[in-house]
Amino acid sequence: MLLFDPMDMTDKKTCYRPLSEIPAGARIVVRRVDGGRGLLSRLAALGLVAGSDLEVLQNSQDGPMLVRARNTRVALGRNEARKVQVEELDG
Amino acid sequence: MIPEESASPSLLVGLAGQPNVGKSTVFNLLTGLRQHVGNWPGKTVARREGIHSYDGVNLRVIDLPGTYSLTANSPEERIARDFILRERPSVVIMIADASAIERNLYLLSELLWLPAPVVLGLNMMDVAKTEGIEIEAHVLAAALGIPVVPLVASRAEGVSALIAEAVRLAQDPDRIKPARPEVGAAHREVLATVIALLGESVPPPYFAAWVAMKLLEGDSEITELARAWLPDGAWRQIEELLHRHEDAVLDITSGRYEWIGRMVRAAVKQPRLGQVSFTDRLDRYAVHPFWGMLLLFAAFALIFGITFQVASPIQEWLDVHIVTSVRTWLRAELSAMPPWTSGLLADGVAGGAGIVFTFLPVLVVFFTALALLEDTGYLARVAYVMDRFMHALGLHGKSFLPLFLGFGCNVPAVVGTRVIEARPGRLLTILLAPLVPCSARLAVLAFLVPPFFGKWALPVAVGLVAANIVVLVVVGIALNHTLFRGHRLPFIMELPLYHTPNARSIAHFVWHSTRMFLTKAGSFILLMALLIWALGNFPGPNLESSYLGYFGRALGPLGELLGMDWRLVVALLSSFMAKENAIATLGILYGGGEKGLGLAETLVASVAPASGLAFLTATMLFIPCAATVAVMRQEMGSWRWVFFAIGLTLLIALGAAALVYQICLLFGWGVIHA
């Protein structure tokens, strides 16, 4: 199931990239989570929902990656990170 | 531990909070030693309960499992919400980490919908301050409509104020009017429709408004329940509605964070971005793919170093000075009695108790290390760094530490799986733990390999350990693709802030884990020791003519396939009591001493290298020792899984030994060295 950010009226999904491709240091916004409700509610409970600002702390292209969301360091497996669609912030 | 209820009034208090917020510290401060640790009914999740007296009122405090939210994602989350729904505590105290307040309030946004008044304890105010976060508790309290008390639990600050608020609220719950997060406008109508459809069908303690929200969230447990409660027609309508509004869950979760944003806006001043904290600086190394690994192995080398420097000598001292002298004394005292009585007491009872006893030093060191790593926040980093490797086995990164401890002893490895939250992951890790070669098995290896293989001893020993690890990996992969298929949970984990470990929490963990081992595992080990002693001493005068001996001979045909005669089979069987017993049994059966030869030489003179290697292979992989079996029962919660583990290891051990023996025959190693 594809779950869209209800606040997002324009169809800009072509600009979104999976979180797994974002290098360390980047600041991004979560736009969409392509996953079941289980994944979605787990991510939400750790502060990752559509609209959350994230900072990528570590991404070594294999294995899990590390992000900061709402002042919490969250480790995400590669498979999970692939399902989080994000948009990079300017600057 | 819990004193009889007195006549003084008593209140039921639930202590809730997300993981790593210092909830246990608060619980220990409140209840001290007046606490009881058990399991939640039908679950293997620890239930901690204690008594706190305040102003003539007895508070019965229940430490709820730490959960990030209250959906049915894990047994812990179900336990926490079921407790509040069914047992209706007078008040719920929620402990929050002030330095990550937004994420913590997510749990509050769910708690406020449950039928219990909530007091919020804002813990780690000191940490928040060093992170540059300022929180005005009274402003937050005004926004939330509930009492908010700032805390520094590690210094016991604010805890009495928290309890005062909790008791006040419990005695007059209508005093407050909490603000609750509402479902976003886009789905408010859907929610109302679901509530209407639920009508009167929701039985207490559940209630329609909460059930409707959980249905929209896609909560698996509530969906199942509602399906059973409702007549078919009404359920089909709801189901259709839920299907059409699958995106409602997004609206609900985002809605909660919008609500949180409103709640904290006036009360919390966030730091300017880009500030580098202590945790960030340390994490540059701790989670680095290379430095992280190096740090991890340094930490583990330290733990094992302490074990061998401190625990092993104590263990030996206990064995020599206490256990052996008690047994010698018993034998001397009972010399007038029939030999079987002194044997029963000195060898059976005292021997069994001695085994329990000598486990203690290693267990205390490992339990302390485990608690220390968990409490400082480093354990989550270990899991993160090792996840990519454990992933292949279908395991969570958190499985690494318990399995690694297994090299010292399998008992703390099994107990240590408590750090893994999800039950399937825990079960799989417990099943694999006995396949980690423990130090007792390595000692057997070190004793037997050199005489048999001379200059090839080192490569043979290393090869055996390596093959053992390969078996572990293969079994892990196999179980993961069969029994545990589809059970892999997503790897999403918080890396908590580093903090100074709390001596009290660590002492509590070590004390309770050790006590559990002594009482639960201890009695089982004693029972097994008596059984094995009886089997080895009756009916005949010695081991050869005992039931154990007969049993070993009866297994002859099987032994032949493995190249093992009945004496090796009996030695293997006796390793069930303790792995190192294999050597002692061989000593009894092969006699040694003949022609002035030691046991090692006697063995080489009567056992072919192929048989020796098969015996070693079987010993490495054989069923877990009695102590490990006892803690496996304790941690798995049922004998069914323990028997599965025993059957599995038995099959693997015998299969591998047969394979090794047959291959060795091909290489002409079946001949005894003259």
Image (tube, coloured by chain):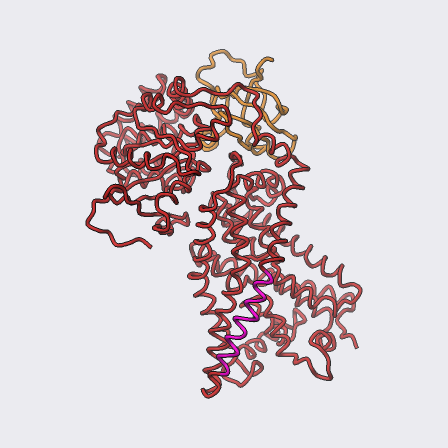
Chain colours: A orange, B red
Residue B281 relative to residue B59: left or right: right
Reply above or below: A79 against B622.
Answer: above
Reply above or below: B272 against B651.
Answer: above
Reply above or below: B574 against B313.
Answer: below
Magenta highlight on residue B363: no
Which is nearer the eye, B114 or B325?
B325
- Res. B431 in view: no
Question: Where's residue B542, x and y in %?
Answer: 56, 83
Question: Where's residue B303, x and y in %?
Answer: 60, 51
Q: To which quarter of the image does residue B378 belong?
A: top right
The dominant secondary structure in magenta is helix
Q: Residue furthest top?
A: A10
Which residue is found at the position 51% from the left and 13% from the top? A11
Magenta highlight on residue B318: yes
Which residue is found at the position 65% from the left and 45% from the top? B298
Which residue is found at the position 60% from the left and 47% from the top? B477
- Res. B394 in view: yes
Question: Where's residue B79, x and y in %?
Answer: 36, 42
Which is nearer the eye, B450 or B335?
B335
Q: To which quarter of the image does residue B661 belong?
A: bottom right
Reply above or below: B603 against B387.
Answer: below
Question: Where's residue B528, x and y in %?
Answer: 47, 69
Q: Residue furthest left?
A: B7
Quadrant occupied by the N terminus of chain B: bottom left
How many tags in the picture? 0
Quadrant occupied by the C terminus of chain B: bottom right
Q: To which quarter of the image does residue B178 belong?
A: top left
Q: Which residues are magenta?
A: B312-332
